Amino acid sequence: MGDALQAALIRAIPGATFRMARDGTYLEYVPGDGFEPLVPPARFLGKRVAEILPADIATRALECIELVLQTGRLQQFSYELESKEETRYFEAKIAPDHHDSVFVVVRDDTERIRDARALEESEARYRALYENIPLMYFTLSTDGIVLSVNSVGAIHSIDAVVG
């Protein structure tokens, strides 16, 4: 693959791309589409991951780097970081580069995780409403088959059958 094509592909990745040494030193950084690092590159290039990230995240990153270099297989892990305004969620994918360095693609997963949590909360509210409404409430298929019924409806159905 030519250098120009490789550079274009790296820039198109929806996340930041880092090249890191086995010891966790940031060697290169290529900003990806829509990715904003929490600290400017001048603060992390040439430094080790343990100097930049919290100890638990740095340890996981170093373990994954070592595993990638030993096995040649892609590794990934998720983590979260607190910024001044909010918690941000990230996913890191680590792939071998040379015998002593790796490529790390970091994607900001914050929006996806927030959306998934909002959906879970909405579904929980719906389930609570469905189950706790003091009326018979049921869902029918287009064929008129009962697909679900809330607890009040189930009690009335049993009463109708038994009574």
Image (spheres, helix red, strand yellow):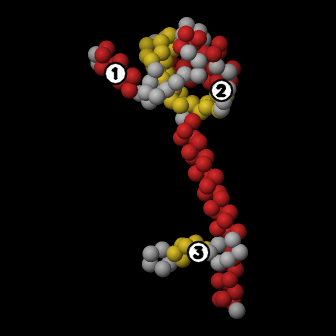
Q: Choose between 107 and 2: the one closer to the eye.
A: 107
Labelled disc at residue 83:
2
Check if mark 1's residue and mark 2's residue have beta carbons within 8 Å. no
Labelled disc at residue 138:
3
Instruction: Place residue 163 in its image quadrant.
Output: bottom right
Residue at 64%, 24% (x, y): give it: 57
Residue at 57%, 31% (x, y): give it: 90
Q: Tell whether 18 sits left or right of 157.
A: left
Residue 58 spot, x, y in % from top left: 63, 20
- In the displayed structure, would residue 111 be above or below residue 43? below
Residue at 48%, 74% (x, y): give it: 141
User: Who comes first in sequence, dot 3 or dot 2?
Assistant: 2
Residue 2 spot, x, y in % from top left: 28, 16
Q: Residues within 10 Å of mark 1 (few under 14, many from 20)?
A: few
- Disc 1 marks a residue whose amino acid type is Ala
Residue 33 spot, x, y in % from top left: 43, 27
Labelled disc at residue 163:
none
Judge depth for marks 1 and 2 and give the one in front.
Answer: 2
Per the model, the C-alpha gap separating discs 1 and 3 is: 54 Å
- Disc 2 marks a residue whose amino acid type is Ser
Residue to which mark 1 is pinned: 8
